[in-house]
Image (tube, rainbow, N blue to C red):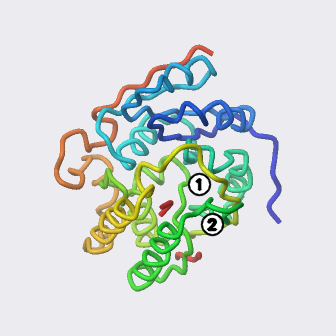
Amino acid sequence: MTTFPVPNHDVNVVLPCLDEAGALPWVLSRIPPGWRALIVDNGSTDGCAELARRLGATVVREERRGFGAACHAGLSAATDDIVCFCDCDGSLDPALLLPFVAKIRAGEADLVLGQCRPQGRGAWPAHTHAGNIALARMLWPRTSLRLHDLGPLRAARRESLLSLGLTDRRSGYPLQMVVRAAGAGWRVAERDVPYLPRTGVSKVTGTWRGTWQAVRDMRRVLAEPPVPTALLPALSRTGLAAQDGAPGAAAGRGSSPEQATGQATGRGAGL
């Protein structure tokens, strides 16, 4: 049985951030003691980067817009053995990552995903739910994974994540992580997590249009030919051009860290 030891200093939490100042204080207060929060500022105009510094977080700037671009900038800036991902809008509690990390440390899983359980009316809009159903149906033929949600709350080892050579820098990033992990034979596990009403409007799925744009990004990921496992380390070293061939796609390119003062099994993307 997995136990939850006292947190230590070998975990980074990547928090993509675009105008999330309203939720930021609560989110950072929920980071387990001893873990390091990496706030990835993706072009915010509400002062959340400055607020994060005052609250003792490390800030990484990623100028290229996109959820995947922000996530990968955080992964590239991470230095600890285990890296977690969490939204920065107050919908998910970073403290819930403790059992995720425990499963990774215990060798019970290689990638742990949060299966979101909406809490309260409006926490999960109808179009978001529909998008997740569509994505789950598309995922099964490619990976044989029976997943219900590819939500943003997740954990894995840093070096293993880098070895996947992830290239998508838009909404397909969480899905590409799972697809390539499955192709590499990773053990993928899910844990139920409460999904709270977010602060503000989602930049990805706040509308039907945004939701289906995200689904199209993910459909493109599923249409990619399988990457031979032997080539994954080479992809991670070369930083193969990301979707649309835009600059800044390689790991760490276009971002700058700023130290603050202070066989796969499982049960779709954090839509």
Q: Residue at x 60, y 17 (%)?
A: 54
Q: Are dots 1 and 2 in contact, CB under 8 Å? A: no
The location of residue 16, given as percent across then percent down, is: 47, 41
Q: Is residue 229 visible?
A: no
Please rate how many residues cluster around mark 2, counting C-alpha atoms within 10 Å: few if below 14, some from 14 to 19, many from 20: many
Q: Is residue 136 above or below residue 108?
A: below
84 vs 108, nearest the viewer = 84
Could you tell whether 47 is left or right of 66 in the image? right
Q: CA distance from mark 1 to mark 2?
A: 8 Å
Q: Residue at x 41, y 30 (%)?
A: 44
Quadrant where the image shows the N terminus:
bottom right
Q: Amino acid at mark 1?
A: Leu
Q: Classify mark 1: helix, strand or loop.
A: loop
Could you tell whether 76 is left or right of 260 in the image? left
Q: Check residue 242 in the rendering and tell me which mark sits there, or answer none.
A: none
The location of residue 39, given as percent across then percent down, is: 51, 33
Q: Is residue 246 visible?
A: yes
Q: Is residue 108 above or below residue 9?
A: below
The location of residue 250, given as percent across then percent down, is: 27, 43
Q: Residue at x 57, y 77 (%)?
A: 265
Q: Amino acid at mark 2?
A: Gln
Q: Classify mark 2: helix, strand or loop.
A: strand
Upstream in the sequence, badge 1 or badge 2? 2
15 vs 45, nearest the viewer = 45
Q: Check residue 115 in the rendering and tell me which mark sits there, or answer none.
A: 2
Q: Residue at x 18, y 46 (%)?
A: 246
The location of residue 107, given as percent across then percent down, is: 67, 61
Could you tell whether 171 is left or right of 100 in the image? left
For label 1, the residue is 153
Locate residue 220: give its quadrant.
bottom left
Please rate how many residues cluster around mark 1, counting C-alpha atoms within 10 Å: few if below 14, some from 14 to 19, many from 20: many
